[in-house]
Image (cartoon, helix red, strand yellow):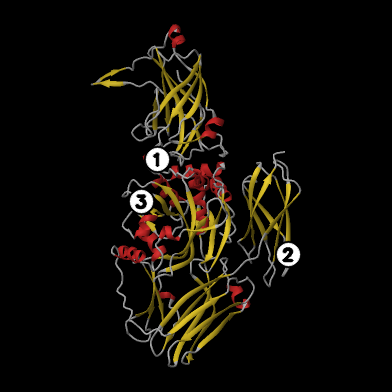
Amino acid sequence: MVRRSTRTRSTPTRFGYTDRFEPYARKPKRETTRTEGRRYVPATPLTLPTLKEKKTQLKVVSVDLCVERNQQEHKTSKYKVDNLVLRRGQPFHLNVKFDRDFKPSTDELVLELRMGSRANVTKGTRCVAPVVTSAPDHDDWGIKVESAKGANVTLKVFCSSEALIGYYNLYILTMSGGDEYEYESPKELIMLFNAWCKDDDVYMADEVKRQEYVMGEVSLYFYGSKYRIGSSPWNYGQFEKMSLDCALYLLQKSGMPDSSRKSPIQVSRVLSALVNAQDDDGVLVGRWDGEYDDGISPTTWTGSIAILSQYMKTRESVKYGQCWVFGSLLTGLCRSLGLPTRTITNFASAHDTDGNLTLDYHYDENSEPLDDYDEDSIWNFHVWNDCWMARPDLEEGYGGWQAVDATPQETSNGVYCMGPTSLRAIKQGHVYMQYDTKFAFAEVNAEKVYWKVFTKSRKAPEVIDIDSDDVGCKISTKAVGKFEREDITEQYKYKEGTELERIAVREASRHVRKAKRILKNLVRDVDFDVDMAEEFPIGKDIKFTITMVNKSQQTRNVFLGVTGSTVYYTGVKKAKVSSYNGTLPLKAKETRVIPVTVPASDYLPQLTDYAGVTFFIMASVKETKQPFSRQYDAVLDKPDLEVKTEGPIVRGKPFTAIVSLTNPLPYPLTDCSLLMEGSIIEGAKRVKAPHVPVNGKMAQRVQLTPKTAGSCDLIVSFSSPQLSGVKAHVTLNVKSA
C-alpha cells in the first residue's frame, strides 16, 4: 500500500516544468493488459497480502524533517518558506516513526529524493540513498541509522555535492518479508548550492566572504562617472519567500535540461537571460529613453521584493529597469540559490557593437560631433555581476569570480544574456574562452579612436587621436563587511600603461579584426588640462576651466571646440545645452585659462533622471596639427533624504519614521511618493508624499511595523516627475519586547 496525497506539484511541459504553483491531482494507477501474438491475455490480478503478512510489513507512520536542526546546520534558517531548505553536499537528519519496531537485520530501508514526475537516476532527478555504515564519497547518496529505539529511528542522510538545484519529493521505501512499501512525505524539500562544502563548485573558503556574498541581504551599487562616484542602497531580500520562489520558477520556465541544474555555470547563465524580458518574458523590461508613464522609473526601486512580488503575482514583465536594477535583481536571485554573487560597477564602460575592441568617434572639420557615424558607445557607468564558481569546462586556473550580465545589450547564442566569463580570461586577454569573453574584455579595455571626417570633400577620414586608457575605470563593488566602495579594477585588468596590460591587449587583438589606424608622430608642445569641480549641486550653474600651456618658443594658434549635452547614463545624448568653438592665439610660453559656464536654466529643462551633463572637448594646434580630445562627465548631486524615528522600536508594534527632503530646484516638486523596503518590514510599502514648494521642505510621517528583532535595514526612495532617485538607508535596532 502506498500513502498518497493530492497537493501542489510540477508537471512536464515543453519548458521543462509547468508552474509548480498550480495544483493538480495525480491520476490513480490502473491495471494494464498485454498481448502475446494475436491472443489477448488479461493482466495478472493483484494478490493482496494475508493478515499475517501485513503485520510483518514495515510502514512509515510519520517523518519529522527536523527543520530547526537541519536549517541551523545548513545555515538556511533565515528563509521564510514552509519547506525544509538544504544546501547540497552536507548531511541532514530525519526522525522516522514506523508502525512497529525497526529491525536493522531484516528490515531493508532506502531513501529517495525525486524531482518532477518523471524522475530518472541517469538525469540526476532521482537520488537513491541506501543504508551505509560510513560516509560515502562526496558525490554519492546514503543513509546511516544513527539511533533506533523501537519504532523511532533517527537517520543521517548523506547528500551529493552535485545534487540538482530545486524542489524534491522525499520518499522512504521499506522491504520486509518480500513486501515493498513506499511512503511519500507531504512536504517538498528545496536543495541549494553550498558555498560551505569543499566539493561544491561554488565553494568559498573565507567565512567572512561567505557572509557577504551569500548571506548579505542589503548592499550598495555605485553609479555616476569616474570623476564623481555615488552609491545607493539595495535590499536583495534573498531569504524572502518571493525571492526563492521566483528563482526556482525561472529555472523551471527556462526549459533548461534537468542535468544542467547542478551546474552554477548553466544556472547563472539562465538567470541572466530571464531577469530581462527582452526575448523570453522575463522579470524586468528595460527602458532608457526616460518615458516611464506606464510603469515605474528605474531610479525609484529600492530593492528586489517589490519587483519580484509584482512579477510573481501577474506573471507579466515589470516596467522598468536599467543596468543597476538588472544587476541587483540578479545578485539577489543568485544568492537565494546559494550562489556567491556580488554587484559590480564599471565606469566608462564600453559597448563595442562590432566586436573589434575599439570605439570609434567621428567629428567634422569644425570639431562638431557626427553622432550618426557612431555605432559604438561608452556608458558613463554599467552595472553587472560576478558569480563565484569553479570552471571545469575551461583550462585549470580559470575558476573564481565570473562576470555575468543580465542587462540586454547584445545576444549570446541568440539570447540576451552574458557570461559567465572568467575574470582571469578577461585580464589575460583570452577572448576566445566561453562565455562572451570578447565582449566583456572590450567593456573594460577597448581603445577610443577619434576620426576626422571630411564632409565637404572625398578625402578619406583620418585618425586625429587614440586614447588607450579611458575605458574601464574604477571598477567597484561593496567592500566585505563594510558599507564602503572597494576598487577591484586590478581583478579585471592590469594597471593601465604597464607592459602586462599591453600584452593582454595584444593577445586579445590577435583574435579579432581591427581596422587599420595610422597616427602620425606629431610635435606635442601645447599642454591641455580640464579642471572640473568635485561637486555639482543640482539646480546650480555648472562651471569649470580649460587650461592651455604653450611650451614652445613660438606662437601657437589653437582651435578649441566645447559641446555640452545632457545625457542618459548610457552615454546617449538627449539635448545640446552649450556650444563654443573658436581659434585662440597662445604666445610663446603663455598659459591661458578659459572659463566655461552652463546656467542651470539651460540644462534643467533637458535633464534626464541620471542628472548628467557630458562635455566633449576637442582642440587642434594649427601649426603642428597636434590634437586633443577628451570627454568629461558632470553628474549633478541630488539633495539628501533624511530618515528619523520616534519612540521605541519593538517587534510587532508600530513606530513612526519621519522622511524629510529639501527642494533645491527653481520649481515645485509635485506628485511625490515614497517607496520603502528592507528587512524591517514585510514586502514593500508605497506612500504618497506632499508637494514640495521651491526652497521648501517635506517631512512625511510614516507608520511601520517591524517584523523581526535585532539589527534591521530600511531603504527609502523619493520620486516625483521633477526629481527621482533620491534614496536613504538606515539600520535600526528592533527590540524583541
Amino acid beneath label 1: Lys
Q: Nearer the viewer, residue 39 or 424?
A: 424
Query: Disc 1 marks which residue?
Result: 262
Q: Is residue 33 left or right of residue 342?
A: left
Q: Is residue 291 visible?
A: no
Amino acid beneath label 2: Lys
Residue, x 35% and y 56% (percent of image)? 425
Q: Nearer the viewer, residue 200 or 588?
A: 588
Residue 697 - label: 2
Q: Is residue 23 above or below residue 290?
A: above
Q: Secondary structure at mark 2?
A: strand
User: Which circle, 1 or 3, is nearer the viewer?
Assistant: 3
CA–CA distance in space, label 2 to label 3: 53 Å
Q: Secondary structure at mark 1?
A: helix
CA–CA distance in space, label 1 to label 3: 19 Å
Q: Is residue 391 left or right of residue 380?
A: left
Quadrant occupied by the N terminus: top left
Residue 622: quarter of image = bottom left
Give the mark, 1 or 2, whose residue is nearer the N terminus. 1
CA–CA distance in space, label 1 to label 2: 54 Å
Amino acid beneath label 3: Tyr
Dot 1 surroundings within 10 Å: few (below 14), some, or many (20 or more)?
many
User: Which circle, 2 or 3, is nearer the viewer?
Assistant: 3
Q: Nearer the viewer, residue 176 or 425?
A: 425
Give the mark, 2 or 3, whose residue is nearer the N terminus. 3
Residue extending farthest top: 52
